[in-house]
Image (spheres, rainbow, N blue to C red):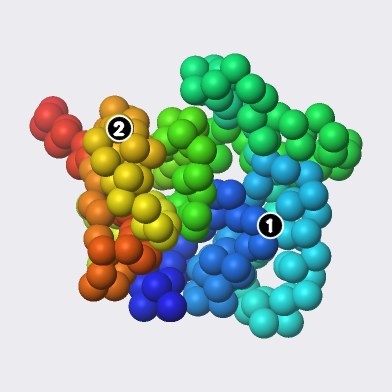
Amino acid sequence: EWLAAHANSLRDASVLELGSGLGLPGLVASQLGARSVAMSDCLEPLVRNLELNVRLNASRVPASTRVRVCAVDVRAALGKAGQAVSSHRTMEETVDERHGFGENTDWLRPDEQFDVVIGSEILYEKYHARTMADAVAAHLRRPTPTADSATPDSTASRPPRAYIMYVNRDDRFLCTDGILWGFVRTAQKHGLAVRITACRQRTRGPLSVVFAPQDPPAETER
């Protein structure tokens, strides 16, 4: 529903979905005019399920839209974030040991960038405040000077955006030391502007967090 209402942001854009799970947001984006959609997850069973869902929905996706399923290297993404929260092994590390990826796995490269990054319900462990914000910052395309001369309706003329959706089930989630504000603070350290809006007019319910790179300083004339 939210993506359909913001379809203009996806038109002709390259889209990355983080923590896809079943891949519903990515599949919706692929049917709303995106140029390409990469759906990703760090757990092998989920990546295989994503591949199945892509095949089952292939007939609904325009032929001009490229849909890709890729894996995220959880060990590189986690770093020491999980250890900083608890001495226990993280869910991702535990599942990763039991279900290994094969040789032909399509890995999401650290240097790949996209016009739009989306994610739904990807903040449920405290260390996700850092790892997910890091991922948004790493994979969101930064504005370039050439965008200023682009045609108004072109992808280059639209500023890159990340849309993160979650359901506020507990008001503690919004406290200053909660996951949300840890997520926001990490994103701001990466130079991203943040806007939080309620999708519905009630205290608990879907919220969206919109990230956008800060405008780069104007180049000095030569």
Q: Residue furthest left?
A: 221
Q: Quadrant of the C terminus?
A: top left
How many residues crowd mark 1 within 10 Å: few (<14), some (14–19), many (20+)? some
15 vs 125, nearest the viewer: 125
Q: Residue 65 location in percent, x, y?
A: 61, 70
Which labelled disc corresponds to residue 177?
2
Q: Residue furthest right?
A: 103
Which residue sits at x=40%, y=58%? Answer: 169
Q: Quadrant of residue 27?
A: bottom right
Q: Residue 37 location in percent, x, y?
A: 58, 60
Q: Quadrant of residue 141?
A: top left
Are discs 1 and 2 less than 8 Å apart at CB? no
Element on which disc 1 rests: strand
Q: Nearer the viewer, mark 1 or mark 2?
A: 2
Q: Is residue 187 visible?
A: no
Q: Work out how far the residue at label 1 is from the one at label 2, CA to CA, in angstroms.
A: 36 Å
94 vs 30, nearest the viewer: 94
Q: Residue 8 location in percent, x, y?
A: 36, 73
Element on which disc 2 rests: loop
Which labelled disc corresponds to residue 148?
none
Name the amino acid type tagged 2: Asp
Q: Quadrant of the N terminus?
A: bottom left
Name the amino acid type tagged 1: Arg
Q: Which residue is under mark 1?
A: 68
